[in-house]
Image (cartoon, grey):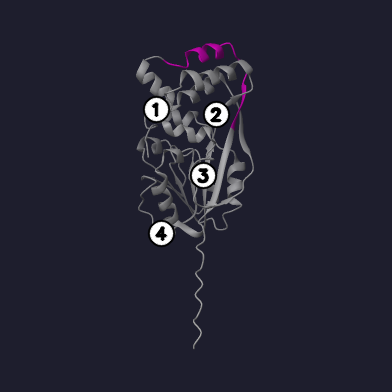
Amino acid sequence: MKDLFSTNSQLYQQARPSYPQIVIQEILKYVPEQQFVWDCGAGSGQFTQLLAPYFDHVVATDISEQQLQHAPYFENVSYQIQPSEKTSFSAQSFDLITVAQAIHWFDFDAFYQEVTRTLKPNGTLAVIGYGLIHVEHHLINQKLHELYFDTLHGYWDAERHYIDEEYRTIPFPFEEIETPELKMEYQWSSAQLLKYLSTWSAVKHYIDKNQINPLHDLAEALSTEHELLNIEFPIFLRLGRAKKQKKKCFMKKKSL
């Protein structure tokens, strides 16, 4: 798993969008017991905070200590520095395992082995992500697309394509549960939008290489906007359960 977000972890915690309640409510439909949940690649706890009210115990892991330090405190949440592909958890521990906007950084095979090992027999895996931001303001949205597809072309990590493909192309060796289309909707100020864009990994890569902030043109366009901007993110949600092993049938030989 890559660690691209330890630097400026406080900005990440402040600027990344919070998931709406509708996401957790959809997931909980398929979690009959709500005792123990593992939120992996938890970062600064954007999704962990949604889980805390519904489970007896929550463990949230990440490889970034800096990210976890900015996560919110809950009495029933334990934050731990552990890679998602190899943990110290006991077998068949969890009723639910969640990954929010992080699975594209994982070693899929190793992570799924860990999921299979630690998930209870009737447990559920929930993979959550969100796509490219859409701004209702036509000019601002156009400049966002230019930033994403043109200016930052070649600066995104290779794994980003899984998000562009809405997680449809990630390996998913589980019995899949059909889910509805979901989205996040907000009203953001220009400053909030720029803060969020500053957390993009490609923006960091661009600045590191060119010593120029690629958000300059967009910031100029936003400086004339004093109203709140209506924005939305498409949410992708994939739910699965471990595939049941088929029972082998042995026929008794007839006595001659």
Q: Which mark is residue 200?
A: none
Q: Which residue is mark 1?
A: 8
C-alpha span from label 1 to label 4: 35 Å
Q: What crowding class fits label 2: few (fewer than 14 Cα within 10 Å), some (14-19), or many (20 or more)?
A: some
- The picture quadrant where one finds residue 235 is top right
Q: Are marks 4 and 3 in contact (CB under 8 Å)?
A: no
Describe residue 93's horizontal placement relative to residue 132 as left or right: left
Closer to the chain start, of discs 1 and 2, is 1
Q: What crowding class fits label 4: few (fewer than 14 Cα within 10 Å), some (14-19), or many (20 or more)?
A: few
Q: Is 172 in front, or is 12?
A: 172
Residue 72 visible to the viewer: no
Front tag of 1 and 4: 4
Residue range corresponding to the magenta coloring: 213-233
Closer to the chain start, of discs 4 and 3, is 4
Q: Position of residue 255 (x, y in %)?
A: 49, 87
Secondary structure of residue under mark 4: loop
C-alpha span from label 1 to label 2: 21 Å
Front tag of 2 and 4: 2
Q: Which residue is mark 4?
A: 91
The number of discs equals 4
Residue 130 visible to the viewer: yes
